[in-house]
Amino acid sequence: MTDQSPPRFPPDFLFGTATAAYQIEGAAREGGRGPSIWDTYSRTPGKVARGESGDVACDHYHRYEEDVALLKELGVDTYRFSIAWPRVIPDGAGEVNPEGLAFYGGLVDALREAGIEPVATLYHWDLPQALEDGGGWRVRSTAHHFAAYARVVADHLGDRVERWITLNEPHCTAFVGHAVGRHAPGTREGTPALAVAQHLLLAHGLAARELRASAAEHGRKAEVGITLNPDRLLPATDSAEDAAAVDRAETLHNRVWLDPLLRGVYPDNEEETWGPMADGGYREPEDLSIIAQPLDFLGLNFYRPIRLRDAPIPEGPDRTAVDIGVEEVPIEGVRHTTMGWPVVPSSFTDLLVDLHRRYPELPPIHITENGSAEPDEPGPDGVVHDTDRIDYLRDHLGALSDAIAAGVDVRGYFVWSLLDNFEWAYGYERRFGIVSVDYETLTRTPKDSYHWYRDLVREHKRRRATTT
Ligand code: GBH
């Protein structure tokens, strides 16, 4: 039996929710916004389920005040959103769009007015199309353009935003975008996808320097982090082959990011993982020192564990960067969400404790996303009674508090997501929100999980007030 009482957290622990620009904003052709690779991808037939796109999404661009009111009623300490690069710099480089900056200025002001600390992610996958046309993340110059964009945003919003996330899940950009092909730009590449990973790491490092330089120049505070989605990878059997397969997958999923960022080294098994693809010539000697500058915090997104077994490694020119000789094996005997993802809360504890053990260099952690996609059928009262989501959140918060008790330094937790939204290649059918969105009328209706989370945050704040 699972414990029904909500877990407790240290008094200064922060609770929030998270969203991302392309998934909620809509207004894709308004306010001077330039096109992004997700506009191109979504408008390409056959890429996104039912041909859906983020053209309208939740229309958050026009309704952000209503959404901030929902956050205020929810009582959260903090809110994580992302800034659309093509709203700020429509072509990715050069001309800045004041209307784009004004939109985020308005959002940040509304949040602060409501007593909610904004956390801004600079890149949640919406690369300006003009940069993709010039080679995208495959070319080094994109990292420098990203740093210039970071500087513009920091100069403009740094008086009201103190916590920054450079990139969201670079793993998805590099490997789902350029090898699996299920995210924009949707290609299936080998060495170029590894170059993308390198340029993303470099972009993070260069942008972190700009965020800090801007803060220093203006006499402001800035905390800089990056959000990764490290996976809890489990071998299907205890064979040596499956253990080796998990080692390769650890490199593809986790070490490719964590080793350079936290230790200033590249994973020592790149050859075993990628064979001839690993030797790309896209690295410069100074890169590691730029990439490995200290992080103020590490953002982690967690949803589910993955079970893997050894599989044949395809050879030849069609081999992509995700073809490393592993195959996913279903995890049975547990509930699965509408994403088909197994619900195993203890794997969240295990992941955090294992990272803590393997990387003594870990900075404080924020769980920048956790949540579940569940059916959206409302009851006769018009409200979605999402008890499965409440169970998911409660059990994962319990698993998180177990990790904290085991010594992992976690400072905050953001539910994914405030609103039902555009779930990338799955379109609008998969719903992660604690607030339901009617995509015909764009009406927002809180689900039971919203009220459950509101009560949890209230209770936490009540205890915080009595202990400080
Ligand atoms: C996060 O990604 C995202 O940051 C967020 O925007 C998203 O809405 C949320 O989670 C829920 O999905 O089978 O090869 O096509 C989570 C990690 C990794 C999940 C890529 C979907 C598809 C891989 N995502 N994965 S593939």
Image (cartoon, rainbow, N blue to C red):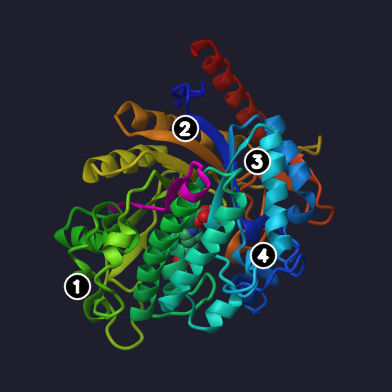
- Dots 4, 3 in contact, CB < 8 A: no
The residue that mark 4 highlights is 87
Is label 2's Cβ within 8 Å of ligand 1?
no
- Dots 1, 3 in contact, CB < 8 A: no
Magenta-highlighted residues: 216-234
Residue 271 is marked as 1
User: In the rendered structure, which disc, 2 or 3, sits on the residue that comes first in sequence?
Assistant: 2
Image location of residue 257, percent across then percent down: 33, 59
Mark 1 element type: helix
Mark 4 element type: helix
User: In the rendered structure, which disc, 4 or 3, sits on the residue that comes first in sequence?
Assistant: 4
Q: Nearer the viewer, mark 2 or mark 1?
A: 1
The quadrant in which residue 110 appears is: top right
- In reply to whether residue 5 is colored magenta, the answer given is no
Residue kind at label 4, given as amino acid type: Arg
Mark 3 element type: loop
- In reply to whether residue 217 is colored magenta, the answer given is yes
Is label 1's Cβ within 8 Å of ligand 1?
no
Of 132 and 182, nearer the camera is: 132
The residue that mark 3 highlights is 434
Q: CA distance from mark 2 to mark 3?
A: 15 Å
- Dots 2, 1 in contact, CB < 8 A: no
